[in-house]
Image (cartoon, grey):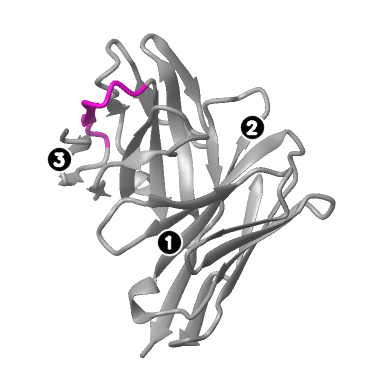
Amino acid sequence: QQQVKQSPQSLIVQKGGIPIINCAYENTAFDYFPWYQQFPGKGPALLIAIRPDVSEKKEGRFTISFNKSAKQFSLHIMDSQPGDSATYFCAAIGGTSYGKLTFGQGTILTVHP
Amino acid sequence: NAGVTQTPKFQVLKTGQSMTLQCAQDMNHEYMSWYRQDPGMGLRLIHYSVGAGITDQGEVPNGYNVSRSTTEDFPLRLLSAAPSQTSVYFCASSYSLRVGGYTFGSGTRLTVV
């Protein structure tokens, strides 16, 4: 079963828009939630991450919002640019399998000029 | 540092053939993992390791074997290739999944005919 569910599968915005990607999880033992960015032909790279005791984290134009009671978290990209066009993955780690990083299904983001 | 090196970059196999995908890292990372990426399915964990001599199964381990005899190398073996194993395979390594996250290789595109 998918332990981290991500939506939407794809997203198209205009330059300057604020795309929002949502993730939900079921395992309450998860204690660290990173987001990865992947450009075509490349491996994913860590973008930003949050722990469940924090409700929001910002790094540049990227913001994670976290709702622990709802077991949901989301990525917001402020003032999106065509260079942000990529696939974004949420992920989670925690519990007894401390070496195991579980990814969501991914969101293909396209930012039009 | 070369980072995470995967070989080969492309491979075509016939059904029933076996092969090994190589992965090497020169960063002295303890954590290593193999993922497969398929459209709409995200990154699914095949096997992972938390140190030399220690491996464990991920979400989709059937048809794959791994070993971790050294810190640097984490090969993935396909025992008897099937068309369902057509995918892009990524190897990743990390010093700490909660600090810095995974460094991914550039991937191996495998086609089984």
Q: CA distance from mark 2 to mark 3?
A: 32 Å
Q: Name the residue type under label 2.
A: Gly
Q: Is residue B51 above or below residue A16?
A: above
Q: Name the residue type under label 1.
A: Pro
Q: Which residue is at the front of the view, A21 or B108?
A: A21
User: Mark 1 highlights which residue?
Assistant: B39
Q: Which residue is at the front of the view, B49 or B77?
A: B49
Which structural element holds mark 2? strand
Residue B8 is marked as 3
Q: CA distance from mark 3 to mark 1?
A: 21 Å
- Mark with earlier residue (3, 1): 3
Q: Which segment did they paint magenta?
A: B16-29
* Letter of the chain that mark 3 sits on in the rendering: B
Which structural element holds mark 3? loop
Q: Between tags 1 and 2, which lies in front?
A: 2
Judge the density around disc 1: few (<14), some (14-19), many (≥20) Cα neighbours within 10 Å.
few
Residue A1: image location, x then y, percent: 66, 44
Q: CA distance from mark 1 to mark 2?
A: 26 Å
Which structural element holds mark 1? loop
The residue depicted at 38 percent of the width and 20 percent of the height is B30
Q: Quadrant of residue B31?
A: top left
Residue B37: image location, x then y, percent: 40, 51
Q: Residue furthest right?
A: A69
